[in-house]
Amino acid sequence: MKFLKLLIILVAFQVNAQQGGMWIPSMLQGMNESEMKSLGMKMTAQDIYDANNSSVKDAIVHFDGGCTSEIISPKGLLLTNHHCGYSAIQSHSTVEHDYLQDGFWAKDLASELTNPGMDATFIVSIHDVTNTVLEGVAQLASELEKQKKIQENISRIQTTFPKESWQENKIKTFYEGNQFILFVTETFKDIRLVGTPPSSIGKFGSDTDNWVWPRHTGDFSIFRIYANKDNKPAEYSKDNVPYTPKHFLPISLDGISEEDFTLVFGFPGRTQEYLPSNAVAQIVNTLNPAKIEIRDAALKVQDGFMRKDQAIKIQYASKFASVANYWKKWIGESKGLKKSNAITLKQNFEKEFATRIEAKGKQSEYGNLLAGFDKNYAAINDYALARDYFIEVVLRNAELLSQGFKLYQLEKVFETKGEQAFNDRKTNTLKAAEDFYKNYSVVVDEKVFEKLIVLYGEKSPLAPESLKTADFTKLTKEVYGKSKLTSYASLNELLKGDAKTVLKNLNKDSGYKLVKILADNFYKNIAPKYDAINLEISALQRNYMKAQLELFPDARYFPDANSTLRVTYGKVKGYSPTDAVYYQPVTYLDGIIEKYVPGDYEFDVPSKLIELYNNKDYGQYAENGKVPVCFIGTNHTTGGNSGSPAIDANGNLIGLNFDRVWEGTMSDIHYDPEICRNIMVDVRYVLFIVDKYAGAKHLINEMKLVHPKNKK
Ligand code: ARG
Ligand code: GLU
């Protein structure tokens, strides 16, 4: 009996111990510290976040708004993913110096490459400002007024909260609008490229291996932050010097074993963990299938051309990768949500929720929530679907339409702001168009359009009447045969003259005319209704969150990701994707050689790497004669966590987060500790490539390599 009790406690604890969650670094002490320690952490919460002294958080950097990076030397050396540095690396590449293909290693500070427009942001301190943000809100009657008041309070606090002149205040909302937190930030603007492996290492496996375990990608690149002479942020200058950080991560050479504690520290973008069951059903049954079908059609067409034509392959490589990334993620997400019975689990939770409302006599406060969700998710269905068709077809995948939409916005600028604003906007539009058309093939786009416009006309619930009954073949000929949006030269011609002339000509263009019909329809018949219902849903969601926190006081709820700094933690752990199959948590260089397909654009391996493998020339980076490449863990991560450091029990760097496993991509909506795993590059593989492959010893010398387990 006693044993049984103990077992129950143990089991309950175990389940709880791997629940996932993305936690606010300044609030670990009460929420997480003891659990983290029980998982093996040797640090204190204060070692991770300390408002007054340097702590691990001072080494964590938001990289160019989208990814995460970390400081790994006292001279501002910054580690992030290869796919995060990709466009910067691409921008420095020419036919003579193709750094994407060959890699790049600056031999000294003077050879590091500047990246105009790139930035890197530190979090200086974190403050809960909920009470001040909500001042004077409760007494307001309508949701619209409440939101307006909240926005006013936010702008006021952001301007008045004490900070240094070079810093910024940013307030973000947590728990669906139940909590507001202010971040004091510091943004550096002079970020230089230091080194990157070739794509055959940094992007090894490409789209075939994307979102997949076992993985063998060396997904890293190295930058450096430069500051002015006072070590403060500054625009690029040749007089800037390497930044001296408050903290940098020591790097462990002792590696990881299954069950080791891991902590991932970064800027996860967006999760939707507290959606009601009907919202999840809508994603699985309606929205994901539509988006997947559209991208599937576009990708098939592009792939067909890319395989036949080298020039098109180069033009479309980056666009294809980014469209394919979420296409593949949504397929995995839908599968995972079904397999883990997410909808049924949510329905069961909602039954329990309703029971507790009754039991606690909270009907007047919370009794309307579930019925409200039912009503509003039913009401928003067609608008949400129509909106996704518009976004995926017009804004994203039919390129002539996307280009046309920029001109639609240009026309709106004229209508709302007049001639001067129009001319400024026109200059910018043309500049962007010049870049766009470099990677545009009208032959490819016409075929994509032909497929997608049929889907739009036949399947979008709120397509314009004229499109529903259109002859799609004729329409395609009409648009692509006559429109001037098919090349930069003809677009440039079309935009000649003053605003009046331009708009007159534009409105005669067959491509533009179609864009206008679609966009007008969207702004008149779809967006306003969608926004109105969505406002209702947000209000319900906020109250639902509040109710859960109140009615389930023992559960620990983390706030959904919102691109703010978070800590997630777990263990190195394999998983079982299907019956009878178990995946080990670590991959090795041997696996790269197994996957090697000479000359293949996804699985080629550089000869230097093969040579190192054949000679077993691994230096200090091998374990039991093998070089580890990637590993997985139970850390709860999402997009934006790319480039996040994986940190050991003592605060040393052990890896670099870059992906999740296919079976667990539904973790943005429903985290299942059984199969949700994040994928990290083992930092010893990073060091091995920098040292043995690239010969960039001077970079290794800058770092602090440690042996926390005393393994040598
Ligand atoms: N799946 C990872 C992420 O979401 C890596 C993406 C890199 N791109 C690619 N198409 N392989 O960003
Ligand atoms: N690759 C993703 C990123 O760029 C991280 C992987 C994920 O979504 O978990 O942020």
Image (cartoon, rainbow, N blue to C red):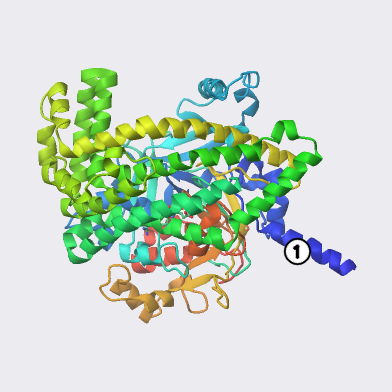
Q: Nearer the viewer, residue 158 or 694?
A: 158
Residue 639, percent from left and from top: 47, 50
Residue at label 1?
11
Compare residues 618 and 673 and report the one nearer the observer.
Answer: 673
Q: Residue at x 21, y 19 (%)?
A: 419
Residue type, numbered disc 1: Val
Name the residue at 72% across, 62% down: 14
- Residue placed furthest toward the right: 1
Q: Is residue 702 above or below residue 507?
A: below
Q: Secondary structure at mark 1?
A: helix
Q: Is residue 72 visible?
A: no
Residue 496, position as x, y percentages in the image: 10, 29
Residue 531 in picture, x, y percent from top left: 46, 32
Mark 1 CB lies closer than 8 A to ligand 2: no
Viewer-proximal residue, 112 or 681?
681
Q: Position of residue 359 (x, y in %)?
A: 81, 41
Q: How many circles with numbers are drawn on the protein? A: 1
Q: Quadrant of residue 191?
A: top left
The extreme front residue here reads 469
Task: Look at the image and tell me in which quarter the C terminus lies.
Answer: bottom right
564 left or right, relative to 571: left
**Is residue 370 visible from the viewing direction of this image?**
yes
Most extreme residue toward the bottom is: 614
Residue shown at the point (33%, 53%) measured from the top left = 86
Q: Residues within 10 Å of mark 1 (few under 14, many from 20)?
A: few
Location of ligand 2 given as a quarter of the image: bottom left
> Does 118 sit left or right of 484 as displayed?
right
Quarter the N terminus occupies: bottom right
Instruction: In the rendered view, tell whether residue 159 sits above or below residue 202.
Output: above
